[in-house]
Image (cartoon, grey):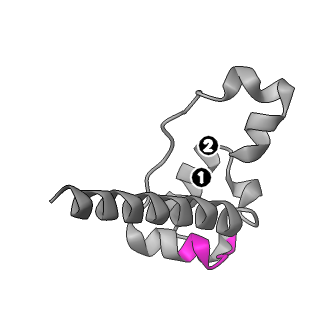
Amino acid sequence: MHCQRVCPENRAYLDLVLEGPSFDEATTRQLLEGAKKDDLPPDLVTMLGEWRLTDLLEYLPRNLGALARRAALRQGTQDSNEGKAR
């Protein structure tokens, strides 16, 4: 993310990527829509709790949305590059 690149305090962490929880499409859609903790299945709440994400549910729609848009842009770039190579 841009904020990590420009903040000198974050430079040591730029390449640090932790493998976190994975979500299926339906769960991702729920999180993107801003589901509240009480609306989520108990096993999902437990998983989010293990990663200390339950207190951050209000931010997940924005952050997951940014990651999804970034992935879509990358995929679009890869697709167009593959088309040029043919």
Q: Amino acid at mark 2?
A: Trp
Task: State the extent of the magenta-drawn residues as a range.
Answer: 30-36
The residue that mark 2 highlights is: 51
Residue in front for this viewpoint, 52 or 29: 29
Residue in front for this viewpoint, 42 or 82: 82
Task: Note whether 34 is above or below 75 in the view shown.
Answer: below
Q: Horizontal and vertical percent for residue 26?
A: 42, 75
Task: Note whether 81 is above or below 15 in the view shown.
Answer: below
Task: Kindly indicate the quadrant of the structure image that contains residue 2.
Answer: top right
Disc ID at residue 48 = 1
Residue 61 drawn in magenta: no
Q: Horizontal and vertical percent for residue 81?
A: 31, 57
Are circles 1 and 2 on residues that touch, CB within 8 Å? yes
User: Quick check: 64 left or right of 8?
Assistant: left
Residue at x 74%, y 24% (from the top left corner): 11
Disc ID at residue 78 = none
Q: Quadrant of the C terminus?
A: bottom left
